[in-house]
């Protein structure tokens, strides 16, 4: 699922709950893929539109970072 929300830091986040992965495109052009991400965090991101994309990126994704 592709998530577009207002963020000064992130252009979009694409999640795959079944695989536990998440792709993030930052506004500065950098692209990261995250593996072994909590399915709960991914579902929260998909269904809770009030969640901050930057907060999710920092809190739940940083430990699973793989740069492309």
Image (cartoon, grey):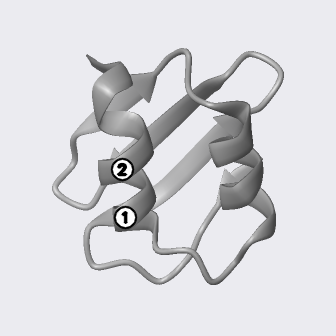
Residue 68 visible to an observer of this rendering: no
**Spot occupied by residue 14 in the image (x, y as percentages of width and height):** 62, 43
Residue closest to the eye, 54 or 30:
54
Tell me: residue 21, above or below residue 46.
Answer: above
What residue lies at 45% left-to-right and 66% top-to-bottom? 53
- Quarter location, residue 28: bottom left
**Spot occupied by residue 17 in the image (x, y as percentages of width and height):** 78, 31
Judge left or right: residue 3 versus residue 52.
right
Return the residue at label 1.
Answer: 55
What residue lies at 67% left-to-right and 22% top-to-bottom? 20
Q: CA distance from mark 2 to mark 1?
A: 6 Å
Question: Element at badge 2?
Answer: helix
Q: Are marks 2 and 1 in contact (CB under 8 Å)?
A: yes
Tell me: residue 15, above or below residue 5.
Answer: above
- Quarter location, residue 64: top left
Return the residue at label 2.
Answer: 59
What residue lies at 51% left-to-right and 16% top-to-bottom? 35
């Amino acid at each position: 699922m592709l998530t577009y929300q207002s963020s000064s830091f992130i252009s979009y986040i694409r999640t795959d709950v079944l695989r536990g992965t998440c792709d993030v495109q930052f506004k500065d052009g950098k692209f990261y893929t995250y593996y072994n991400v909590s399915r709960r965090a991914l579902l929260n991101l998909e269904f809770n539109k009030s969640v901050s994309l930057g907060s999710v990126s920092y809190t739940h994704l940083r430990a699973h970072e793989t740069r492309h």
